[in-house]
Amino acid sequence: MMLFYIKVFFLKLDSNNKKKQYMKYKMLVLDMDDTLLNDDHEISIQNKEMLAKAQEMGVHIVLASGRPTPAMTAYAKELNLHNSYMISYNGAVISDLKEDKIIFEQTLTQQQIHELYDYSVKSKTHIITYVDGEIVSETDSEYIEIERKITGLVHNKVLDFKAAVQSSAVKCILLEEPAYLKGVEKDLKLVMPHLSVSMSKPFFLEVAQNGIDKGASVKLLAEKLNILQSEIIAVGNAGNDLTMIEYAGLGVWVDNVTPELRHKGDVIVASNNNHGVAEVVRRFILN
């Protein structure tokens, strides 16, 4: 009798997994760096081909990145996402690509940015924000240079950060050596619990307005499009992707996911260098 119940239990589990695997998904949300993009910051031919097939089936392909909006548009064009939407600045901005307009934006106040600057001085980290489409900082750093190369934005090094930032901005990033920055992350969450804090790379600590993250923006966009939570797949690799991975009906990590997050998704696919996004489309959309 016990063997019978065990068999029924596993049959139910298998049935649930099959239902999840073969249900019709309507939205595919993709992190960019280290997820959709390989280590050369390119979209592989395999990923392009599979995403084109998903679009042909009517699936909304949504790029969701910590990147500034201007650093995402070329990739959206490369994928022919002319009628889709894009989530940038870690969820602080949602853009309608068809209408070429922002449909949602939430910023940090000038006071919050100045307080983050004071915290960065105290914690001995670099800090950047974005003003008039440029990266603004008071310091130079190898990590700021990485952000400049990734985004293609001009780095405006200023003498006085507070004087240069006289208005609100979508987000700030604190930057430093990964092991040290991990401790800063824990402390900042305690010191400023009213802000949204997450890691996008081991040396990038992203800070946005309270309640702003990728998951919240995916939810907002899905509701606008009348798409159910269960009809969404989200794919990512890092801490700033966790909220959308947990929100989506199917949360997927690529194999190069931050190790401590591996158990917090539903599925793990191939790495960003081995066309993990193509695998997602092939397994869960084309089927």
Image (cartoon, rainbow, N blue to C red):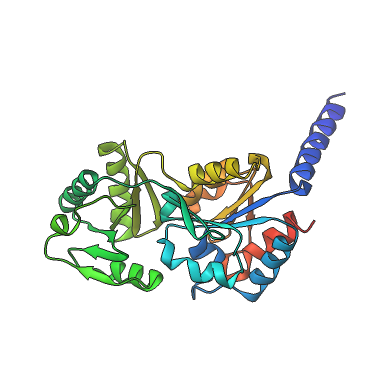
The image shows residue 34 at horizontal and vertical percentages of: 50, 64
| Rendered residue at 81%/39% (across/down) | 15
Q: To which quarter of the image does residue 200 belong?
A: bottom left
Question: Is 96 left or right of 205, judged from the image as shown?
Answer: right
Question: Is 200 left or right of 156, judged from the image as shown?
Answer: right
Please say whether residue 279 is visible from this viewpoint: yes
The image shows residue 233 at horizontal and vertical percentages of: 64, 50
* Residue 89 versus residue 74 in the image, above or below: above
| Rendered residue at 49%/76% (across/down) | 40
Q: In which quarter of the image is the N terminus?
A: top right
Farthest residue, direction top: 1
Q: Quadrant of the C terminus?
A: bottom right
The image shows residue 270 at horizontal and vertical percentages of: 63, 63
| Rendered residue at 32%/43% (across/down) | 186
The image shows residue 161 at horizontal and vertical percentages of: 16, 58
Q: To which quarter of the image does residue 189 belong?
A: top left
* Residue 286 versus residue 147 in the image, above or below: above
Please state the total of marks drawn on the protein image. Answer: 0
Question: Residue 149 or 15: which is nearer the viewer?
Answer: 149
